[in-house]
Amino acid sequence: MPLTSNTVSAAAPMPTPSRGSEREVFLDAVRVIALVRVVLWHALGAAVLTYFVAAVPTMFFVTGSLLAKSLRRGAVKVIVDRARRILVPLWVFAFGAYLVMATAHALDRTPKTAVPWRDIPFWILPIDDPVGSKWEGGYMSSPLWYLRALLWLILLSPLLWWLVRRAGLCVLAVPLTAVFVLEWLSRRGSFTGTWAWRVGDLALYSCFVILGFVHRLGRLQRLTRWQWAIIAALAAAAAAVWCTTQPVPGHVVNDSHPAHLFVGLGWLSAFFVARPFIERVAATRPGRGLIAAVSPRTITIYLWHSTAVIVSFEVLRRASLSFPPGGWVVALLTLTAGVTTLFVLAFGWVEDLANKRPADIWPQTAALARRRRRVPFAAVAIAVLGALVLVAAADESVFAGRRAEAASEPAAGDASAAKGSTLRVPSQAPKAPVFVPATTASPTTTDTASSSATTSVSTTTVPPTTTRPPFDASTQKALTDALGAWMAANAAPGVEVSIYQPGRIDWSLATGTDPASKAAVDNGTRFDIESITKTFTAALVWRAVDQGLLDPDAPIGALKVVPEFTYAQLTVRQLLRHATGLVNYRDTPAYLSNALAIDTPRKALAASAGQPLKFTPGTQVEYSSSNYLVLGFLLEQVTGRTYDSLLADLVQQAGLGPIPHSAPAPGLPNFSTAGMMPTAAQLARWGVALLKDNTPQLSEASRAAMRDIDPATGFGGGLIGYCPCTKNPDGSSHFTGLGHTGGYTEFQYTADDDIAIAINVTDSIYVPDNRYDSVQALIGQLRNIALGKPS
């Protein structure tokens, strides 16, 4: 998972005091709870987890309390001691990471695997975030942002401790104010970018370090459980108000410092309310054992667990196993725990040395401690590291940034939908249309072009008097046979198809398997339609135009939630038609260097905003998903509602039934550009709802603008035109179908025949390279069979 400072609710906890020091059960227990939540978040990547157990604030609170206890011995000594406890395990991890990256580059000397030797200083002393190669995809380097934040606060701790002893909680006024001032400046565009966020980190987390100092001074003990409960309730209410009234990108708490402040304070207060219960559980034999095993290895677990996550995910992905609902999550978490334990056995003893403790292969194991000189610690570490190198050498895609997959399963536990949260084959621009002269004018077409009047598409249905052949068992068998023959000829593992013609045909067929989940597909299988989500966004945008909320041809102005976006001169029409020159976020240096760090729509658009436009807006057309990210933020800005709430209303209005919309995930910002997961039948019905029934209730002008297809590129104002394409005698262009394509999915509605077809190929429409044309031919063949026309 991408473990960046502004999205990851993770914390490398402050290293445990030496074994001889007094144990503090409450602090140890909440540190273990937070660390477990860290692993869950990085393994599953569900945004909802960021609302439960605010790990970073909790860990900084523990850090502050332990630092205050140590600072009584002298500032310089404590800084050196704490830095050693962090840096020594980091250096061992850095050696392993560079060894693995260098091995990958030796086997595949491409820019993707190039080793960032110039960044070694930050792996040695993380005063800035260490970065790895594009190949490792962030699984090794991204978690290290926390060590930068932790080091900064350790260096500042003597000053903060001095201030707290003299002014108490009043010191909190400075960082608290800074959190909200920085948020305000960011929205205005006055102080943005990477360093602005890092200063925000410093302001936010210093609040919890200060609370830890106050706790060490004994002043928090004056509060009763009822008082803590009141604080928790007020913090929860503040968090709810902020998260529902203010922009929280991707609904991820960690993407908003103020939201994180409220949620963190609420959970910290809740821990104090539950303190007696926590201490009782921690005092039980299982509780003592867990704390004894985890506390001396917190740095090791933090450094290595994300590598364990991706290794575990790849093992499960390659295993020919099928799981019941929820089974995949259980298997992933179980395997992650096992692989993390292996890393702890191999490298945990380094943390002992860093803390000036006798090295143990397993914490608190007296028998092994007595024989520790006989344990070949280095040999064990070398063996495990060697195994990791061999795994990387055997299959470079284990870490590959462009192809690494986020390890998560939908909350519903539907294994067939698991691929919806992975880095999949991306949607691509359609092939340029090829036109042939029409022998006669295309029937009942309506001109939908701009002033040049060169484009037309059919917008009416077959007249009621037209005789339609029966859609009987023989027709359905012919469809099934054609689909089976296509699958065999194209080596497709699985296909889902739905054909819908109102009042006559409502037919679906799913056959084969999903290679990502190994599960059989059926008519109820949901799949990520990727960029077809843009058709829903386009409908919402044109509806906002009809409501007077947007002007399609006026400059859009500033985006409040993404102040880095400075291309205020772009228009809504240009964005809908991909005529802006805005660089696709997938093609930015930020994404190419660490795709998994781009895990929110805000980050994706910020990455695009940092690049110059590829051409003057309005002069060319080039597909870019970033255009529709802008439209999503614009919809939220002008309506005052979240994109998901607008989307849910549109889906309900279309009578499609519930359609999940995947939350942003590592490498997949989703939002208004991707992530909807319908069935094939729902997608086919959407084609009819949008293009025939007009359930979005768009004006005729907006409908025409949406269907206005550029004959040179096939792009319209939210739709794509599909061939066969003809030139009418009057010079206008005619497209047989309208719809959209995703990386695996396509839907087309043909108004001439009033029929919609949706198809999902479980291993991609675009791979292998020649499959796109074959899919178009299949859609045409299925349409002809269903209509009783010659194939």
Image (spheres, rainbow, N blue to C red):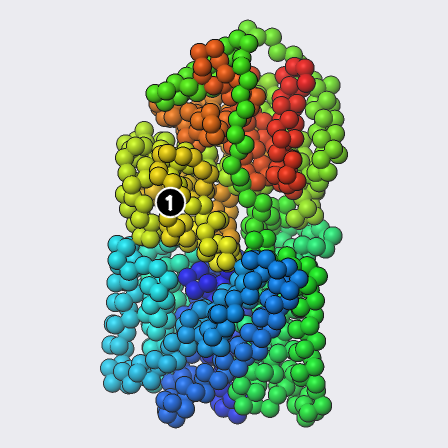
Does dot 1 land on a helix, a strand or a loop?
loop
Please say if 123 is above or below 665: below
Residue picked out by circle 1: 613
Q: Please tell me which residue is depicted at 67% across the width and 84% down the height of the picture.
A: 377
- Percent position of residue 76, x then y: 38, 89
Q: Please tell me which residue is depicted at 31% across the width and 81% down the height of the picture.
A: 160
Q: Is 128 on the left-hand or right-hand side of 739?
A: left
- Percent position of residue 202, x then y: 35, 71
Q: Is 168 on the left-hand or right-hand side of 157?
A: left
User: Is disc 1 surrounded by few (<14), some (14 to 19) or many (20+) residues within 10 Å?
Assistant: some
| Screen quadrant of the N terminus | bottom right
- Percent position of residue 789, x then y: 65, 14
Q: Amino acid at mark 1?
A: Leu
Please say if 282 is above or below 540: below
Residue 168 shows in the view: yes
- Quarter-of-image position of residue 248: bottom left
Residue 236 shows in the view: no
- Quarter-of-image position of residue 364: bottom right
Please say if 81 is above or below 91: below
Foreground: 233 or 259?
A: 259
Foreground: 609 or 502?
A: 609
